Structure formats: structure tokens, C-alpha cells
Image (tube, rainbow, N blue to C red):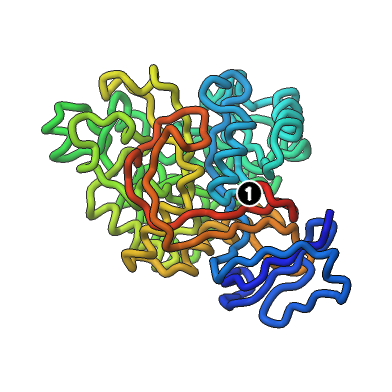
Amino acid sequence: MKEKILKNCRIIDPSQKINEIGSILIDDNGKIKDLGKNVKISKSSNKTEEFDCDKRIAIPGIIDMNVFVGEPGFEYKENFRTLTQAALAGGVTSVVTMPNTKPLIDNVSMVDFIIRRGRDKSNLNIFPAACLTREMAGREMVEFGLLNSRGIIAFTDPYQAIQNTEIMSRIMDYASDMGVLIMQHVEDYELSKNGCINEGEIATRLGLQSIPSIAEKIIIERDLTLLEEFPCRYHINQISSQKSVEVIKKNKKNGKKFTTGVSINHLSLNDNDIGDFKTFLKFAPPLRSENDRKSLITAINSDLIDVIVSAHKPEDEESKRLPFAQAASGSIGVETLLPLALELYHNKSVDLLKLIELLTINPAKILKIDKGTLKVGSDADICIFDPDKPWKVDANKLKSKSKNAAIENKSLQGKVLMTFLKGQLVYS
């Protein structure tokens, strides 16, 4: 591979507190060789491939901590090839894949399969998560130590919390000893079962069974209480409400160490957007009120939320074109994660450097991976984007195999122009 130099780009790297116009030099092994204002190329510059970025922004490749890939079992919704295409088009170079496949990722043979399949069919950095409990039944924990040693980055039962407190305490106790990362979907089953929309005026008007925000708050309070006894690596997958923010603020103030995520959907949309039963806007957790949405943005600016995720969940048309209560939850989003996040920058809700931090170095720190940075010697995973380029979302032009885009037809400002993975130009 030739050396490459990305010239005349605005380099933003929160991991090194860099925000300046300069160049990035990539060596022939796909590593960052030098960067900044004073990068020099060797005299044999004819061996160096040059890219003029025209003062566009260069950031570390984005890390998305919540992505569903359909392999195995749901290849008709998404597969490694289409996920890779969508991710790279969105500047995402590393993903944590969810384990709710068919069969589930809850044993060694399935872990070996998913790692091998990801390696053979994708050039993304794939970091697979495994189930917290066998068959995601919430009764018996998986073999944390064994699965972690085979390449599992975290453990989660997607879209369902561990309801039994005694089992959750044992999970956290064991996780504390093993040093593994627990990612919890926070939602009390008894308060949320059969619900499909936020509790409030919209649910009443549409005649739909609702999910109160207290269902989220109760599980967070329980788990953070357990965290006093069992101080493990604990991450809340997604929060959606002001009540949850208040609990997190109180516990952070008391010195508890844990991390919190939020989906870009909950930062950009509210329950009013559902209109007349728009099933593409059915999520888990559900979209909340505008006050809840604003409280999540305030939480980001107050360092109470650590990462933003796409919560990329492809669904086929048959799963979405149903009555709202019966339709599947979720939306594709890995390709539009950065452009939608930039909306918060353009409307002056969140500083650009803060957004980049939540998409790059923060998830890397939580996962304990050597990504999310442009430091010398690290892999040259780089996203180049124009923050001002206008475009309109057309699901048929997005790379994902499924087309259930919650923000279909939305006008956005900000587009990924190039993505480099280990020094190779993989999207332009």
C-alpha cells in the first residue's frame, strides 16, 4: 500500500484535543504516521498518494455501540456486506453488533461463527456482543469468562432488561470479578408489556397502550443501587426521558462510575412526530415528549450522557407495514448517524467537538479498544465530511438492505465524503 497524505483538512480529534487545519500522513501499513500543521512528506513524494480535503473536517472513524446485523437467521433484513456498505457511507468504521440473531449469540460455537463470518464478509471493525443470559430468557447467565476470551466485547440482552433482581445482582457480581462490560436495556417488563408508545396525550389520542417513563427509571435505580455492592463495568444502552436523566445526575454526583448511551433518534424526534400511526417511528424505548428530548440534550452538555448510537435495527417491509401495536420496533440509522447528529450542531444545541467526542473516543474508552483516535501509530480509520453539504434522505438510495428509515424524506445538512479504514479508501 502506498503512503497517503490528506492535505488541507480541519482535523478534529477530541482524544488529543486537536482542532486545526493541517494534514494527516498515513504510512504504507495503514497507520497514522504524522498529523497537524507541520506534516512533512519525504522527498520521494511521488510515492505518496495525495488527497486535497479542501478544508473539510477529518475525524477518527465513528464507533457505533448499538448495531443489529441480520446474520445469522435474518439475512433478509441485513447482512455483513450491506451493513458494511451502510456503515462506511456514514463514516462508521467500528460497530458493536447485537446478539439477538437466530440462533442467539450465547455460546462458544456461535461466537466463533459470528467472528469468522464478520471477518470473511466485512472489512469493518466488528466487535460482537453476546447475550447476558442463555436464550435471552433472563434466568441463567452465560459463560462470561469463556466468551470474553473468545472475542466478545460486551454482554447484553437487547430490548429486554434482566427483571429478576437476584439474577441481576449475581450477573453484576460475576462481571465485577471478570472485568467484563454489561450493557443493560433499561425497561421494567410489567410496566411496559403490551405498550408501544410514550404515555401521554399522543397515546390517548391514538388509542394505543403506552409505556411510562418510570419503567425506565425503575430499572436504572435498581441497577445503580446494585452497583454500590458490585462495582462492575456497567453501561445503560439507551435512555429516553427526563426522569432517567435526574436519576443519572444524582448517582453521578454521588460518585458512582457507570456510562450512559442515547440513540440519535431520541435526540432528534419526539412522540409528536409519530403523527397518525407512522410505524417507522416506533422504537424501544419509545419516542418521548419534547421536554424529554430537550433534557437529553442538556444531559449531553452536562456530561451525563457518554455516547450517541444509531440503534440501527433493520426491519423488512412486512414487519413494519402493520397496525402500530403489531409493527416491529426500530429503524435503520448507521448511515445517517453523523448527518443527523450534525443537526444538533447546526441548531446550536451541542458543540461540534462534544458531538465528535460522543461518537469516537468515548465509546472507545467504554469498550477499551484502541480506536476513536488519530494519534500517531493508531490505525488510520478516518472519516472526512462536509458539515454544510445539504441533502435529502431517500431510503431507496441508502446502502442498508432494509429501508425502514424513520427520517425518510428529511432534509439534512452534512455529508460524509470519504471514509478510510486502516489507511485504505473504502468509501468516496
**Quadrant of the image occupied by residue 172:** top right
Residue at 78% across, 60% down: 31
Circle 1: is it few (<14), some (14-19), or many (20+) Cα within 10 Å?
many
Image position of 213 (left or right of 121): left
Eyeballing the image, is 36 above or below 26? Answer: below
Q: Position of residue 416 (x, y in %)?
A: 52, 54
Eyeballing the image, is 353 above or below 87? Answer: below
Q: Is residue 252 visible?
A: yes
Q: Amino acid at mark 1?
A: Thr
Image position of 410 (left or right of 66): left
Q: Residue furthest right?
A: 44
Q: Position of residue 366 (x, y in %)?
A: 60, 55
Q: Is residue 139 visible?
A: no
Which residue is at the front of the view, 127 or 42? Answer: 42
Q: Position of residue 404 (x, y in %)?
A: 40, 31
Image position of 231 (left or right of 406): right
Image position of 39 (left or right of 349): right
Eyeballing the image, is 135 above or below 23? Answer: above
Q: Position of residue 10 (x, y in %)?
A: 57, 72
Which residue is at the front of the view, 351 or 181? Answer: 351
Give the secondary structure at mark 1.
strand
**Quadrant of the image occupied by residue 29:** bottom right
Residue at 47% across, 49% down: 337
Residue at 11% across, 33% down: 205
Residue at 40% across, 42% down: 219
**Quadrant of the image occupied by residue 285:** top left
Q: Which residue is mark 1?
A: 93
Which residue is at the front of the view, 266 or 130? Answer: 266
Which residue is at the front of the view, 275 or 30? Answer: 30
Q: Residue furthest bottom?
A: 38
